[in-house]
Amino acid sequence: METLNFRFENGTRRVTPHAELVGVVSSGNLEVLIETAVLNGGCEVEVKTAAVGFAAIWQAVIADFHLRWSLADVRISINDVGATPAVVSLRLDQAVESMMGATT
């Protein structure tokens, strides 16, 4: 297992205070927990993955996610057992949309 941590500053979008869990590790090999936290406008992402050695790919996927959403005061926990970058992006977007009450 590898644990990766990312932090982004100066987010501009806040979500309703609560937590949201999307996906399960056995379905698509990924689960995402997103929750509000007091982070001085920051967004923290922790990835626990069985796929060791892919930090650069995770950095790219998480940075792209942050560009799309620019979240503030949000903590995201990801448990991964080999999901593709497309599945990661999909689950992250689903979590944020659920937090915002969006329908897709």
Image: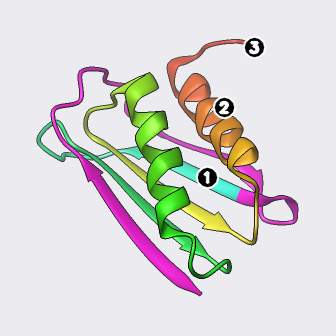
10 Å crowding of disc 1: few (<14), some (14-19), many (20+): many
Give the distance between the C-alpha atoms of the residues marked 1 and 2, in whole angstroms.
Answer: 9 Å
User: Label 3 belongs to which residue?
Assistant: 104
Tell me residue 104's x, y (percent).
75, 14
> In the rendered image of this protein, does residue 90 appear above or below residue 47?
above
41 relative position to 34: left or right: left
User: Label 2 belongs to which residue?
Assistant: 94
User: Label 1 belongs to which residue?
Assistant: 32
Q: Which span of residues is magenta-colored?
A: 1-30
Badge 2 element: helix
Is residue 4 inside the magenta stretch? yes
Tell me residue 64's x, y (percent).
47, 36
> In the rendered image of this protein, does residue 4 appear above or below residue 7?
below
The residue positioned farthest toward the right in the image shown: 27
Is residue 59 inside the magenta stretch? no
Amino acid type for the residue under numbered disc 1: Val
